[in-house]
C-alpha cells in the first residue's frame, strides 16, 4: 500500500516540477536538472521504499540546520542554545533581515538563516567541520556524504545577504564566534551532498526518538529530538510552515537544493529530492507528493491512520 502510494505520488509530482524553478542565487545550484524527482520512505519495521531519483546526490542546504540544531542541543543544552535564538515562526522569508533590526537581534528560530548562523557560532567553538561531518554521516547512515566544494565556493562568492545578517547579529552581540569563521562553517554545512536515502535514514532516527533503527544505539537524546521535531513542524517550511502543517501535518524541513526530510513520528522517515522550487524555496513537487501521501495514508499528525 505504501509503495503504491509512493509510486502514484511520483507520477503526480513529475508534471509539477515544470511549475517551479531551481535556485539560481547560488549559481552552482542553478545548473541542476529541474525535472529530478525521488522519494524514499524507510519504516521502523525495516521496509525500504525507493521511487524515482533516490540516489542522486544533491546539496543539503537548509536541511543541515536541523542537524546543527540537534548537535548544538546535545553539546550545550537547550537553555544555552535558546539564550539567543527564539522558538517562534518568523512568517518571513528564510533569508530575511526584517525582524532582526526591530527587536534585540535574537533570531526568531534556529531554522531561518539568522538563527542557523547563531547556532553555527556555537558549533565552531566546540567542533571542527570534520568532526561535525563525521556526525552527519553517522546520523544519516551514509559514509559517502562529502562537502561539495563547487557549491561551497559558489555560495561563498554570493554571500552578501548572509554576510549582512551575520554582521548585524554580531553588532547586536548575539553571535558567539568570529563572523567569517561562522559564515564559513554555515556555508560548508549547507554544501554537504546527500541523497533522498540519507534523509530518509535521518528521518527514521528522528521518528524513533533518536535511536538507530538497526543497531538500537541511541544517537541523539530524546529531548533533543523532541525539540527538533517540534521546531520542524512550526518553522521547517519557512513562511509556508502554517499552510504545510494544515495540508500535510508531518514535521518536515526543506532546503533550496530541493530536499525535504519528513518524520511520521514513531513510524517512518521520508527523504525527498525535487530541485524545482516554489516561490518560498520549497520543493514544489515534493510538497505535492507529501500532501498526497499524507492524505492517502492518513499520516497527518492529527488525522486517522489508513492502512
Ligand atoms: O543560506 C542560504 O541561503 C542557503 N545556504 C540555504 C537556504 C535554504 O536552503 C532555504 N531553504 N529552503
Image (cartoon, helix red, strand yellow):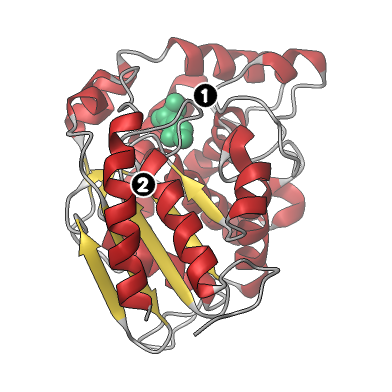
- The residue drawn where x is 38% and y is 28% is 184
Vertical arrangement, residue 64 with respect to residue 41, above or below: above
**Which numbered tag is attached to residue 259?**
2
From the viewer's perspective, is 22 left or right of 305? left
- The residue drawn where x is 69% and y is 15% is 98
Whether residue 18 appears in this view of the structure is yes
The answer to which image quadrant residue 16 occupies is top left
**Residue 305 screen position, x and y as percent:** 59, 80
The answer to which image quadrant residue 140 occupies is bottom left
- The residue drawn where x is 44% and y is 49% is 288
Q: For label 1, count other residues whose C-alpha is less than 10 Å away and answer few (under 14), some (14-19) or many (20+).
A: some
**Residue 259 screen position, x and y as percent:** 36, 46
Q: Is the residue indicated by label 1 positioned so its CB lies within 8 Å of ligand 1? A: no
Q: For label 2, count other residues whose C-alpha is less than 10 Å away and answer few (under 14), some (14-19) or many (20+).
A: many
**305 or 283, nearer to the observer:** 305
**Residue 85 screen position, x and y as percent:** 71, 38
From the viewer's perspective, is 2 left or right of 174? left
- The residue drawn where x is 37% and y is 77% is 2
Q: Quadrant of the N terminus?
A: bottom left
**Which numbered tag is attached to residue 178?**
1
- For mark 1, give the secondary structure: loop
Whether residue 181 appears in this view of the structure is no
**276 or 247, nearer to the observer:** 247
- For mark 2, give the secondary structure: strand
- Find the distance from the CA under tag 2 to the CA under tag 1: 30 Å
Amino acid at each position: 500500500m505504501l509503495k503504491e502510494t509512493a509510486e502514484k505520488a511520483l507520477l503526480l509530482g513529475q508534471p509539477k516540477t515544470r511549475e517551479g524553478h531551481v535556485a539560481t542565487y547560488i549559481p552552482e545550484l542553478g545548473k541542476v536538472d529541474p525535472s529530478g524527482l525521488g522519494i524514499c520512505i524507510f519504516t521502523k519495521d525495516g521496509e525500504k521504499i525507493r521511487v524515482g531519483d533516490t540516489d542522486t546526490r544533491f546539496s543539503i542546504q537548509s536541511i543541515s540546520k536541523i542537524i546543527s540544531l540537534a548537535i548544538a542541543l546535545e553539546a550545550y543544552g537547550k537553555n544555552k542554545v535558546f539564550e539567543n535564538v527564539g522558538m517562534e515562526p518568523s512568517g518571513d522569508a528564510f533569508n530575511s533581515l526584517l525582524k532582526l533590526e526591530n527587536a534585540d537581534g535574537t533570531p526568531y528560530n534556529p531554522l531561518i538563516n539568522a538563527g542557523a548562523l547563531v547556532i553555527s557560532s556555537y558549533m565552531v567553538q566546540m567542533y571542527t567541520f570534520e568532526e561535525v561531518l563525521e556526525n552527519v554521516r553517522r546520523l544519516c547512515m551514509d559514509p559517502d556524504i562529502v562537502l561539495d566544494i563547487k557549491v561551497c565556493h559558489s555560495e561563498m562568492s554570493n554571500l552578501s545577504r548572509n554576510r549582512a545578517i551575520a554582521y548585524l547579529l554580531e553588532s547586536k552581540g548575539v553571535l558567539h564566534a568570529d563572523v567569517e569563521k561562522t559564515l564559513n562553517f554555515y556555508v560548508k554545512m549547507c554544501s554537504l551532498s546527500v541523497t533522498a536515502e540519507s534523509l530518509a535514514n535521518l528521518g527514521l532516527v528522528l521518528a524513533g526518538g533518536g535511536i538507530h533503527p538497526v543497531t538500537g544505539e541511541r544517537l541523539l537524546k530524546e529531548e533533543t529530538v523532541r525539540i527538533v521535531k517540534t521546531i520542524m513542524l512550526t518553522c521547517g517550511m519557512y513562511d509556508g510552515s502554517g499552510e504545510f502543517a494544515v495540508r500535510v501535518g508531518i514535521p518536515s524541513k526543506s532546503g533550496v537544493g530541493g530536499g525535504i526530510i519528513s518524520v511520521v513520528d514513531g513510524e517512518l522517515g521520508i527523504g525527498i529530492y525535487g530541485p524545482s522550487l516554489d516561490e518560498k524555496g520549497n520543493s514544489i513537487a515534493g510538497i505535492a507528493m507529501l500532501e498526497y501521501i499524507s492524505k492517502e495514508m492518513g499520516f497527518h499528525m492529527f488525522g486517522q491512520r489508513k492502512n
